Image (tube, rainbow, N blue to C red):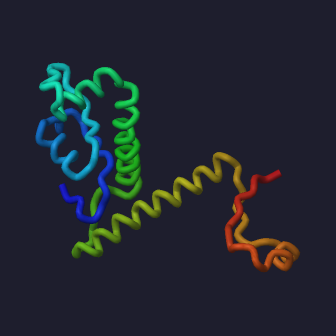
């Protein structure tokens, strides 16, 4: 796991990734691995990382699953982006591929904002009326969201 450029606080993964090694690798970089235990998993040694996480999973299940289910939010987002913009990347170079994927996520976020705007009846105001503009010359340039009516 590369933590050279990022601070790792939490790692979530499904049961297939549950192992002593994976728990240790995440702990080495300062994070906590939220990987649910399998039905045949045992508590292990009392003071080991495995034992601590097993007891956390067993006795504080709701708190554990709150962290774990953040994974489903990320997976839902990836699924929506793939469904809307396809799962292929056509660019050839690493930089171009990265930019293409980032553009897909940017477009997805714009689509979500537009959908929320339509569903919630929010009217976007892109420039103020003349009298408002003269009154607030020092005001920051922010696009206010106004509900109609």
Looking at the picture, how far across and down is residue 125, in whole percent? 73, 65
Looking at the picture, how far across and down is residue 89, in whole percent? 28, 65
Relative to the observer, which residue lies in front, 84 or 38? 38
Q: Residue placed farthest to the front in the image?
A: 47
Vertical relation: 11 (above or below) 98: above
Vertical relation: 23 (above or below) 2: above
Identify the residue shown where x is 67% and y is 46%: 120
Identify the residue shown where x is 29% and y is 27%: 56
Identify the residue shown where x is 76% and y is 78%: 138
Q: Where the N terminus falls, by quadrant?
A: bottom left
Left or right: 84 with respect to 54?
right
Looking at the picture, how far across and down is residue 55, in whole percent? 26, 24
| Residue 41 visible in the snapshot | no
Q: Quadrant of residue 141?
A: bottom right
Identify the residue shown where x is 38% and y is 58%: 85
Q: Residue placed farthest to the right in the image?
A: 131
Relative to the observer, which residue lies in front, 39 or 1? 1
């Amino acid at each position: 796991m590369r933590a050279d450029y990022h601070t790792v606080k939490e790692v979530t993964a499904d049961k297939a990734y549950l192992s002593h090694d994976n728990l240790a690798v995440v702990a080495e970089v300062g994070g906590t691995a939220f990987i649910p235990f399998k039905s045949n998993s045992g508590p292990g040694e009392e003071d080991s990382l495995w034992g601590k996480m097993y007891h956390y999973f067993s006795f504080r299940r709701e708190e554990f699953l709150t962290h774990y289910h953040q994974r489903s939010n990320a997976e839902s987002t990836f699924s929506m982006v793939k469904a809307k913009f396809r799962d292929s990347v056509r660019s050839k170079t690493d930089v171009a591929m990265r930019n293409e994927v980032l553009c897909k996520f940017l477009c997805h976020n714009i689509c979500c904002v537009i959908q929320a705007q339509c569903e919630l009846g929010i009217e976007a105001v892109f420039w103020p009326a003349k009298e408002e503009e003269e009154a607030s010359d020092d005001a920051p340039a922010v696009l206010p969201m106004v509900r109609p009516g």
